[in-house]
Image (spheres, rainbow, N blue to C red):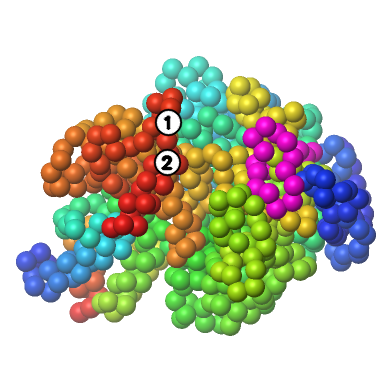
Amino acid sequence: MSILNPMNNHILSTLSEYITTEILKQPNRSLAPDQPLISGGLIDSFSLVDLALFIENTFGVHIEDTELNAETFDTLHELSEIIQTRQS
Amino acid sequence: MQKHSIRCMSCLRLSKPGNHDQHNSSYHQATHTNSKQENPIPSMASNPTISHVVHNLYQQEPERIAITLLFSNQPDQNITYRRLIAGAAGYAKALSQAGIRPGEVVILILQHGTELIYSFFGAILQGAIPSIMPFLTEKLAPDEYRHSLEALFEITAPAAVITYPEFIEEVRVAAKGKKSIRAILVSNEVTSIADSMIAEFNGQYSSPRDIVLLQHSSGTTGLQKGVALSHEAVFNQLESYSKAIRLSKSDVIVSWLPLYHDMGLVAGFLMPILTQVRLILLSPFDWVRAPFRLMSAISKYKGTLTWQPNFAYNFCAQKIRSRDLEGVDLTSLRAVINCSEPMYWESHQMYLERFQPYGLRADALATSYAMAENVFGVTQGGIEKPVTIDHVNRQALSSQRVAKLSLEGEDALKMLSAGFPIENTQLRIIDSTGIDLPERHIGEIAIQSDCMLSGYYNRPDLTSRAFLDGWYLTGDLGYFANGELYVTGRKKDLIIVGGKNIYPQDLEKLASDVPGVYPGRVVAFGVYNQLLGTEEVVLIAEAQPIDTEARHKIADQIRTHVNRGSDIALRYIKIVDRAWLLKTSSGKIARQANRDKYLQEERHV
């Protein structure tokens, strides 16, 4: 799936905005699609549930609690792929 | 073999303190009156050791379930006393074969699970001293973790380390040059041993005064202060604390707490196992990703008691989906005990509103003031009667250091009582010169008990500094009212995030490593967030570049470096010009003053 896909872009920017505003408290910064979020220490374990709830409420996609780890997704790109796959 | 005596525990009620004049002194001690209780837990034999008690429990009822271990996506796993001691004896034997002697320290670097449980008791059966090191999480930078390990090895001079095969290399690197370490054991090479082999172990020669375990806070600073506890201290604590919570063998304790923390290790592990109270143990890793699993476990196993830090009340109330609570029944819960960080009435209310529809009773909300230096509990509130709420005047509390009762119509601060001191633990509230303060005056909490630490391990200097005329100075601030303790804050700069003690100097040192930051010109502190029910960490660093883009980059690097080098996630990072930070007269960065300056500035933004 291409990063240039407009649907993907929308998901990426929505996720990025949520993470920078609500988790990092730095609304003015941007996140690269391949930046490691979990292993890079940007998203701590206490914020993972929030992220899962946000994804469910925003995209209607359920992320299992057992999937909330860097192995399942560690970047915005990987996360948006999961969302798109499950939406289709 | 010592016989396990069943001494009748007839004195179970903790009543209001009497027999001493509360008006002249803030010296407080629990007294108790007689009451009967069904199914009392067996009192410990005189002069017990953990090895003896575990062995006796195994002999009495080998098939009784000690622990039910819960993991996401795995069937629940029952560990009987037979399995527990057989698993532990395997580790004891392996340690013995590796030449590890009684009294030597064994560091456990294992994730939550059977290996950790068995190796912990195995070290004790061998008469050695286990110390649990939090396991490397996926966000922690291996380099920083190695520094922590080196710091721990340096100060505790362990004889052995037990870990996973894939982690052996990491341990070898950290152990380089540490002559004390004679063995690195691999968990998968240790097997449980047969019943017939269990009788003989070196731990049976341990004496009650011997150190049985070490308990650390995290970070390079926390690791310098290993709280060394004796068998005697542990059993004295269990005796007093179990009375304070009216523990009986029909109780079921449900815990998601990590075992490297005193609340998890004592309330959610040692106490139930050593008193034959069933323990349902969840993994903290699973809980933080699916807090509903705690509720499901309570419902499924009819849990009666659970402990958690204040933030978990908010976390559970806000982050559990209703569909995950379908069919959950919490009526069995008799106490949800708030402990290990400042407690807030708002958090209790939030929790009650969310879970009352599922059967949570208002009177189940309870409180405790606890610390590893007293093994665990110091006070207990909210058992058999609701937690006392003290309505105090906000202004007098902060400006006059007095908890004045608020007047009708005033916007009062609702203080949650931490309850009464447990038996054999005495409390004082003292001023900076060590003089007792009257009721409702805020001072430092000092404690004396029959379950105090033996000392900070290999740190007699820190140990002697922690005591004043035989009283342990907690560094916490509080006041007494009607015999109950209210904790209002702390003297020291410690940050408590989600129940974890974080030393700001560790975070400051990490941030100083980042290029562009003036070394040492960094300050970290906590700011309470009512929505989260805990503190958020703010870090301010003085840095060279002035343009915004470069500053963002430095802030990013600080965030990544600190988050990966510590147990917490930084929330707010502020990059400031040279000379923004205030210093004390002795030239040190003044944390409190800089915190005030930051809050003042934020208010005006």
Q: Position of residue B420 (x, y in %)?
A: 76, 55
Please tell me which residue lies in front, B116 or B7.
B7
- The numbered mark 1 sits on a residue in which chain? B
Helix, strand or loop at label 2? It is helix
* Disc 1 to disc 2, C-alpha distance: 9 Å
Q: Are marks 1 and 2 in contact (CB under 8 Å)?
A: yes
Specify few, some or many for label 2: CA neighbours under 10 Å numbering under 14, 14-19, or 20 or more.
some
Please tell me which residue lies in front, B387 or B157.
B387
Question: Residue beneath label 2, please?
Answer: B593
Residue B584's tag is 1
At a point 91% along the width and 58% down the height, the residue shown is B33
Residue B56 in sight in this render = no
Does the magenta run of residues contain B450? yes
Q: Position of residue B226 (x, y in %)?
A: 58, 32
At a point 67% along the width and 76% down the height, the residue shown is B361
Looking at the image, residue B360 lies above or below residue B115: below
Precedes in sequence: disc 1 or disc 2: 1
Please tell me which residue lies in front, B347 or B293.
B347
The region drawn magenta spans B431-452
At a point 45% along the width and 32% down the height, the residue shown is B220
Tags 1 and 2 both on a single chain: yes
